[in-house]
Amino acid sequence: MKWSAGELADRFELEPHVLRHWEDKGLLEPARDGAGRRVYVEDDAYRVAVILASKASGMSLDQIRVLVDASADGRRAALKEHLVELDRRQAELERSRHMTEHALECRAHDIATCPGFRSHVADVVEGTRRGLPLSGVRHS
């Protein structure tokens, strides 16, 4: 199977310039036909799928380049770094979910006036603790 830039981009619902950008970043290396036009083959299509899936997981193009370049060092380090970032984002989402559930169930319309929330963050307001862990807020 062979595709032009437009055909392959269309298959993945991308604009062709995205493929050219990824080529500039060292993520794709399409062959060229006799007229110098890019020709993408099946391996390129799988590479595009990897790039899109990796981007969807929050990886940067630099991180993805390390994953798809067999000669690049640091593959394991990049993956471990990404796992740390995913853990951070997951904790952030869990805090956000907890806060939203608390606000939904709280009798106070303004969450800042909710006695449960106020008691949970009183030490931060007073300056005896820093940060704002939002788990453990009781509803009032």
Image (cartoon, rainbow, N blue to C red):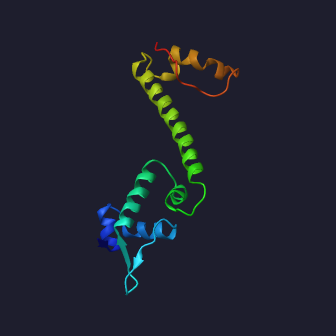
Residue name at image x 57 percent, y 50 percent: 76
Q: Looking at this view, is 23 or 137 the one in front?
A: 23
Residue 106's image quarter?
Answer: top left
Residue name at image x 57 percent, y 17 percent: 120
Residue name at image x 60 percent, y 54 percent: 74
Quadrant of the image for the N terminus? Answer: bottom left
Judge from the rendering whether residue 101 lies leftward or rightward of residue 82; answer left or right: left
Q: Looking at this view, is 97 or 40 the one in front?
A: 40
Residue placed furthest toward the front: 70
Residue 125, placed above or below residue 34: above
Residue 108, placed above or below residue 11: above
> How many tags in the picture?
0
Judge from the rendering whether residue 53 lies leftward or rightward of residue 83; answer left or right: left
Residue 54, placed above or below residue 14: above
Position in image of residue 3 (x %, y %): 31, 72
Residue name at image x 59 percent, y 20 percent: 121
Q: Looking at this view, is 106 or 129 the one in front?
A: 129
Residue placed furthest toward the bottom: 35
Residue placed furthest toward the right: 128
Position in image of residue 124 (x %, y %): 65, 23
Position in image of residue 112 (x %, y %): 52, 22
Position in image of residue 34 (x %, y %): 37, 87
